[in-house]
Amino acid sequence: MKKSVLAIVALISAFLFASSDETLRAAWFVKNISCKVGTPLAGYGPNDISVEKLDDLQLHGLALDDGRTKTLLMSFDLVGMNADLIRRIRHACAEILGVKDQNVMLSCTHTHGGPHTRRYSKKTSSSVKSDSFAPAEDIDDEYVAFLEAATVDAVKRLVADGKWRDCRVGFFSSQCDENRNRRYTTVENCASFNAHRRALHKLTTGIADKELGTVALLDATTYEPLYVIGNYAAHPLASHAPGRGGLRITSDFPGFYRRYVERETGATAMFVSGACGDLVPKDDELGVNAARKVGENLAMASVAAIIDIKRNDGRFVIQKPRLGASIVTMESRLRAPYRKMFGRDTEKMELQVLSIGDIAFLGVPGELANELGLEIKWHSPFKRTFIAYCATDYFGYISTLNQVAAGGYEPQSQYFASRDTLRLVATAQDALLSVRSQVFPEDCTGEDPYPDNLALPLVNLPGGVKASKWQRGANK
């Protein structure tokens, strides 16, 4: 009897106390980065002056340590940042953590209720005259200085506090019908920007990535959620109603997502925007209730995901949460109006990978169309890949070649040559494959590297009937 009790205790302990290979350490911070009322708001042009604050703009940071290296993922409630600002912040934070710059990823939620933190051109607005693109907006230099200092201070405090927690990492993928494609394309392939034609909303049945990615860090002992990341593709402008509604400082629906998850689970929550270049919430620009609706619907889906993760840990908890990171560069020719605007013919853009075991975040240099985001997901070697919006630069919209042929708002604002967008996808795939092979070198042995060397059953359903059983029945 005594031996039986000891055996049961040993089994329970093995379940609750994961081995060091199955856990990693995590620490996180939340920083208020709100601007003052009266600050011009970015996203709808240079002349929207804020008159009130709906909620705080926040910076969320999550540091991870797998015993081999550290990474830092940060999400800013901002419309976007240019590459020079991103690189300065990235480098400063990397030095504090003692890691390479590639181990630090920034991403912007793309809220349209925050200050101007991006610059389209080094020239002044008055010197840029063209009918093919909007004048450059004036960056808020005072706010940018505050932002840099606040970010560096937050990371320094994180390291000094040393409040690391042992965690297991779970992930889940849900389909959430909270967005729509804002482009309507006619039979002859002419596109309409339906933000200006709401009567056409019912006709907008174009491709829309409905995936809500949820990453949950669970306490290694109790399995209770400590930290949650949500990833979804939709422009955060649900609250941007005409008039006063569009003049509020706000994080929009990502804030409602975070607050709901935190209230109901006790965990800290981060939101990372996906490839939403041509996606908006279904109830876009209708006010606070619209933002609350989409944010809380997504949050409830993440809470449901956590239930599945905890109760099916063999499927959804990563067994080897090793960390990986990379930054790669591609160069593209600028389109004619922008060669004049930028004063050069080509532009170098960065793509960034930050991986945790079986999942990866892919950071992009601007407003990626959801179709291209899906292409990257489809061609990734990781079980799940989540796009991190405006992570390495704010380089305008990035559309497919055929979207440029169809016209419309997003392609009109695309800086670089449309024939290079598929090359961007291929560059992303190469970067993901490279990180995967570095983190899991044992998977790349043999005649074929991962994933071509996988010997999977015909029916690869966890807990289901083995393929060999089906095959035996078929061969009788």
Image: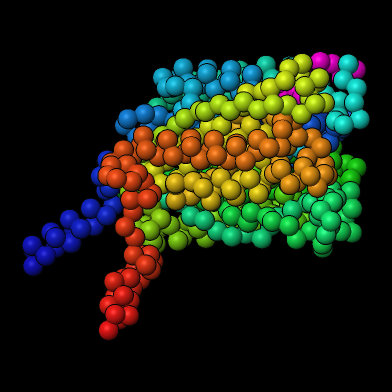
Q: Position of residue 153 (x, y in %)?
A: 55, 20
Front one among 318 and 397: 397
Is any part of residue 289 visible from this angle? Answer: no
Front one among 192 and 155: 192
Front one among 5 and 418: 418
Asked which quadrant contains residue 127, the reply is: top right
The kind of secondary structure the magenta stretch mainly shows is loop
Q: Position of residue 290 (x, y in %)?
A: 76, 54
Using residue 221 as the reference point, say whether residue 369 is left or right of it: right
- What colour scheme was applied to this rendering of the protein? rainbow
Q: Identify the residue shown where x is 33% and y is 76%.
A: 470
Residue reaching furthest to the bottom: 476
Q: Position of residue 254 (x, y in %)?
A: 65, 45
Q: Identify the residue shown where x is 52% and y is 60%.
A: 304
Taking the magenta stretch, the answer to whether it contains residue 342 is no
Front one among 87 and 169: 87
Q: Is residue 106 above or below residue 453?
A: above
Q: Position of residue 283 (x, y in %)?
A: 78, 55
Is any part of residue 328 visible from this angle? Answer: yes
Asked which quadrant contains residue 372, the reply is: top right
Using residue 24 as the reference point, say whether residue 285 is left or right of it: right
Using residue 173 as the reference point, say whether residue 295 is left or right of it: right
Which part of the image, by quadrant, shows the N terminus? Answer: bottom left
Q: Is residue 436 above or below residue 32?
A: below
Which part of the image, by quadrant, shows the C terminus? Answer: bottom left
Asked which quadrant contains residue 88, the reply is: top right
Q: Which residues are magenta?
A: 117-126
Q: Identify the residue shown where x is 48% and y is 35%.
A: 431
Q: Identify the residue shown where x is 38% and y is 49%.
A: 451
